[in-house]
Amino acid sequence: MKYYFAVTREMKFNDAVEKTIDELKKEGFGILTDIDVRETLKKKLGTDFRKYRILGACNPPFAYRSLNVEDKIGLMLPCNLIVQEIEDGLVEIAAIDPTAAMQGIDNPELAEIAVAVSEKLRAVVGRL
C-alpha cells in the first residue's frame, strides 16, 4: 500500500503552493506549519536543493475527534503535504494517506476518522 497520493502538474512552484493551500481550505484544513526545505538546507548545510515545501495541514474537527479517541495521535499530526519542483515549470504535490499511516494503530474509531480525512486529502490532490 502506498503511504501517499500525488499528482504532477505543469505550473509554477509558488502557484502550486498557493493552489494547494486554497484547496485545503475548501476541505476545512488550515496550515499549521510551512517548512521551506530548500531555504532550511541552504542555511543549515550551505547546500543547494530543489524547491520543496512541507505543509502541515490540520482539519480541527477531525484533529479533535482523533485526539479524543487516541491520546498519542498527536505524534502523527498534522497531515503533511509536499510541493516539490521536479523541473522548471513541473511540480509534484503529494499528501500523506492517513489510512496507511494509521494501520499500525489498533483503534477502529481512529480508522474511521482516517478514512474520512483521507477522502478529503484525496479530493484536494485530485483538484490540483
Image: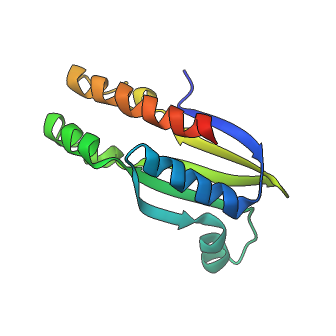
Image quadrant occupied by the C terminus: top right
In this view, the residue farthest toward the front is: 26
* Closer to us: 62 or 82: 62
Q: Is residue 43 above or below residue 24?
A: below
Q: Position of residue 63 (x, y in %)?
A: 26, 44
**Residue visible at 44% across and 29% down?**
119
Picture layout, residue 59 above or below residue 36: above
Residue sitting at x 60%, y 42%: 94
Q: Report which quarter residue 101 is drawn in.
A: top left
* Residue plotted at (52% across, 32% down): 122
Please state, as top left, top right, bottom left or bottom right, where the N terminus lies in the image.
Answer: top right
Residue farthest to the right? Answer: 88
Front in this rendered view, residue 70 or 90 = 90
User: For the point 64% across and 45% down, which residue is it?
Assistant: 93
**Nearer to me, 2 or 24:** 24
Indicate whether 1 appears above or below 38.
above
> At which x and y percent is residue 15?
68, 60
Answer with the quarter of the image where residue 27 lies: top left
